[in-house]
Image (spheres, rainbow, N blue to C red):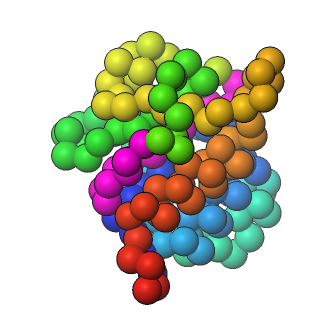
Amino acid sequence: MTSDLRIALYQPDIPGNTGTILRMAACLGLAVDIIEPAGFDMSDRALRRAGMDYAEQAVMRRHPTWRHFLEWNAGSRRLILATTRAEQSYRRFAFRPGDILLFGRESAGVPDEVHRAADIRLRIPMVPERRSLNLAISTALIAGEALRQTTDETE
């Protein structure tokens, strides 16, 4: 099973989260784009430990900068940003094959320039006065819903 959906991580900070996301992506047939610079060495032991041997099996593309990522995409796929600043819930959104699910840094989210470049901004509804979820959990929630909507149920 593979999907045309992609996960993009904007300058991730925590190798364990990135490793977990790579493992999930490998198991679910999703590709991952890492938009650098990352807050850790991509060969970091924690990244390998969290991803286990699955991280090596993930389809991963590294982009040295945000600008390189935008040039690579060239508007060919919708950029869907997960952000606490969004109004629309991911549960009430119609995902399409080919969408790129974009997630920001654990420490700071994404800058305004990335917000402006996103085609759609979605949030995960939470109990009031809670700040945010772990990046790997957020990615799993949204990717799971996107897969549910875009994958043939016979698989």
Determine whether, in the image, residue 71 is placed left or right of residue 23.
left
The percent coordinates of residue 45 (x first, y second) are 77, 57
Q: Which residue reaches farthest bottom?
A: 154
Give whichever of 9, 128 is nearer the camera.
128
Q: Decide: is 2 above or below 4.
A: below
Residue at x-position 32% and y-position 24%:
117
Check residue 146 for magenta coloring: no
How many numbered circles does the render carry?
0
Name the quadrant containing residue 101. top left
Residue at x-position 77% and y-position 21%:
128
Q: Decide: is 58 above or below 117.
A: below
Q: Decide: is 122 above or below 94.
A: above
Give whichever of 59, 43 is nearer the camera.
59
Q: Which residue reaches farthest top?
A: 112
Q: Which residue reaches farthest front?
A: 92
What is the magenta range? 93-107
Name the quadrant containing residue 67. top left
Determine whether, in the image, residue 62 is placed left or right of residue 48.
left
Determine whether, in the image, residue 151 is placed left or right of residue 109.
left
Magenta segment, principal secondary structure? loop
Viewer can see residue 65: no
Give whichever of 79, 65 is nearer the camera.
79
Determine whether, in the image, residue 139 is placed left or right of residue 131.
left
The percent coordinates of residue 54 (x first, y second) are 64, 73
Residue at x-position 42% and y-position 42%:
93
Residue at x-position 29% and y-position 42%:
78
Viewer can see residue 125: yes
The percent coordinates of residue 152 (x first, y second) are 39, 77
The percent coordinates of residue 102 (x first, y second) are 47, 40
Check residue 97 for magenta coloring: yes
The N terminus lies in quadrant: bottom left
